[in-house]
Image (tube, rainbow, N blue to C red):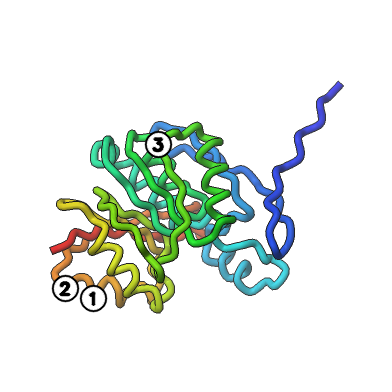
Amino acid sequence: MTTPAAPPPVLSTSIGDFPLSECRLRVGDKELSVLHTDAVLSLGEETRFLNDPDRRAPYGAVLWPGAIALAHEIAARAAEFRGKTVLELGAGTGLPGIVAAALGATVVQTDRSELIIHVCRLNGERNRMAGIEYRLADWTEWAEETRYDWIVGSDILYADTQHEHLRRIFSGNLAPGGRVLLSDPYRPPSLPLLQGLEAGGWRARHSRWAIDTGDEARAVAVYELTPP
């Protein structure tokens, strides 16, 4: 007799209930399991997601290519994260912070949504990560004073109204010698912040990741920013 499969967990929100799906990823030498409401990886999938009124899943609970690219970048730089402190902004499903914690970093994951923090916690517990703290935090009312070795974020630069808040956080919450690591799928609205930081003396370099395969592969930049 076959045992029936367990029903998928459900994320209950004010706009409805959303079944959570599992994505298993091998990042570096680790296999991770991440729950999400939807996986939007290619540009075509993103266009359909943003223009389909029936796909109402909260953006932060969606698995985006920027999170996967940032997770791989962190894994590729394991020695630079081991034993360090990490602040993750707009943590979403929490994948990059989970990778950093798996490498031995102490991680604080932040988001302004209690719902998203709940998803982060689910995924942290799912991967047995003890080195992660979860905090509600709004960039426009930022009160965090702790300084971190790394500030990381995936696909958080798309709204130019938030750029000044992000600049303030980067400047105020990096420890001496600290760096910022941001992934972005080459969105044009992201460039003014990056250019403004460079004009202010920040050093910037970037790597390029291809997420998915074939014609649907999505190019994602991961920018490393070092303050003056």
Q: Amino acid at mark 2?
A: Gly
Q: Is residue 92 above or below residue 162?
A: above
Q: Quadrant of residue 122?
A: top right
Left or right side of 180 for 159: right
Q: Amino acid at mark 1?
A: Gly
Which of 50/153 is in front? Answer: 153
Front tag of 2 and 3: 3
Answer few, some or many: residues within 10 Å of disc 2's Cα (few below 14, many 20 plus, some between 14 and 19): few
Q: Give the spatial CA distance, label 2 vs label 1.
A: 6 Å
- Most extreme residue toward the right is 1
Helix, strand or loop at mark 2: loop
- Kindly identify which numbered label has been placed on residue 200: 2
Q: Give the spatial CA distance, label 1 vs label 3.
A: 34 Å
Q: Give the spatial CA distance, label 2 vs label 3.
A: 34 Å
- Most extreme residue toward the top is 1
Left or right side of 212 for 193: left
Name the residue beneath numbered marker 1.
196
Q: Amino acid at mark 3?
A: Gly
How many callouts does the rendering have?
3
Q: Residue at x 27, y 36 (%)?
A: 83
For the N terminus, which image quadrant? top right
Q: Quadrant of residue 76?
A: top left
Q: Is residue 85 above or below residue 53?
A: above
Answer few, some or many: residues within 10 Å of disc 3's Cα (few below 14, many 20 plus, some between 14 and 19): some
Left or right side of 20 for 132: left
Could you tell me if the residues under marks 2 and 1 are in contact, i.e. CB atoms within 8 Å? yes
Q: Residue at x 37, y 44 (%)?
A: 107
Helix, strand or loop at mark 3: loop
